[in-house]
Amino acid sequence: MMSSWLEKRKVRPMLPVVALLTGTRTIIDTGSRMIYPLLPVFARGVQVEISAIVSILTLMQLMGLVAPFIGRIAEQRGRKFTILLGLLLYMAGMVSVFILPDFTGLAIALLVGTLGRIALGPAIQAYIGDKVPYQRRGLYLGFVELAWSGAFLFGVPAMTWLIAQYNWQAPFLALAILAAVSFVMVTLRVEPDAPVVRQVAFLPALRAAASSPMALAGLCLGFSISAANQLVSVVFGTWIEASFGIQLATLAVAAAVIGLSELTGEGIVTFFADKFGKRRLVLVGVSANILACIILPMTGVDVNLALGGLFFFYLTFELSVVATIPLATELSPDSRAMYLTMLMTAVTLGRALLTPVAPVLFASGLLANCLVAAGLNLVAIFVVWRYITVK
């Protein structure tokens, strides 16, 4: 009883800090998520074809490969330092569209902003992993992950309104100002952490972070579930159009459905991961996503069924990936920041490598994509069941 009371007393002061970090993540994620639905607007603003910006989006994905180098900074200089560094990079990126109001400026904004996001995300996760007992991390990390869906459901409409009222540059100014406010608040409110100082070269540090079978299993888990998701994400819009005709309204509703499913999945992790168990919740989520992969191709006969199938697919994926984060904070605890950036790299590789595969499989129908996705999920279940012992 006394130890439980002490634990709650220790964790409670983290609530305002976690709320601040969630707000910060929402700002950063809004800048990332607004690009896709507003792609034609930005292309017209800088007078280029959409394909030119798509090439920048591909580079943004591949930048996840540099995450371990930034993880090294978080280990040597501290989590708070890296969070602030990420915010500085993000602000620098956002203001570049005012220095260069053309395609070059937009490209710099997206790429430097992405680098800031890569620095900030794992550093926040590692900071919470350091400060919060494992038994409570599902709650706090799940709460932070609400920023991803919150950015889509609230941040993107706000940025769309700014464009309608002003111009295509207005969202970047708003995000730069909000990031500056967050920088000040993080500086004042987030407790400094002691850096994990290690005079070890980069490659040995990388090997040390993923030296155990359990740590490698976590990376395989991240790769497999993200790859499975990408096989459907790349083609679901084409599938809807092929099944029901070109209906922009339907695609808009599908986007809203995905946002709500993400919010639901994040909410489940936030409130149930600690009680149910992170590992168990990952297994449930991935297993349910296999079921979603089987069901989704059958829903192409009715638009409402298809939207329901997409909701279930993205709900189970978001449940899996968000439950993976608190689990991953304990898979290599001596190199937590480095390991979490390696997990980001594994997720990035899963998306990048399977993106060109998705259209090839889709030539045989959505069922082909879903069957391969189910196979990747089976790999994820095997490595979690066989090698991960953390509950």
Image (cartoon, rainbow, N blue to C red):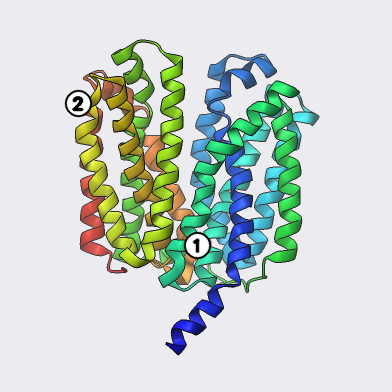
- In which quadrant is the N terminus drawn? bottom left
Disc 1 to disc 2, C-alpha distance = 37 Å
Q: Nearer the viewer, residue 85 or 326?
A: 326
Indicate the quadrant where residue 114 lies.
top right
Amino acid at pointer 2: Met
Q: Is mark 1 on a helix, strand or loop?
A: helix
Task: Give the numbered dot on residue 298.
Answer: 2
Q: Up-down: is 291 above or below 163?
A: below
Crowd tier of the residue under label 2, counting other residues whose Cα lies within 10 Å: few below 14, some 14–19, many 20 or above = some
Q: Which residue is drawn at 71% across and 34% down?
A: 172
Amino acid at pointer 1: Tyr
Left or right: 214 as drawn, with respect to 351: left
Q: Name the residue under label 1.
A: 140
Residue 48 image offset from top left, x and y in percent: 63, 15
Q: Nearer the viewer, residue 60 or 235?
A: 235
Q: Which of 369 and 135 is in front in this view?
A: 135
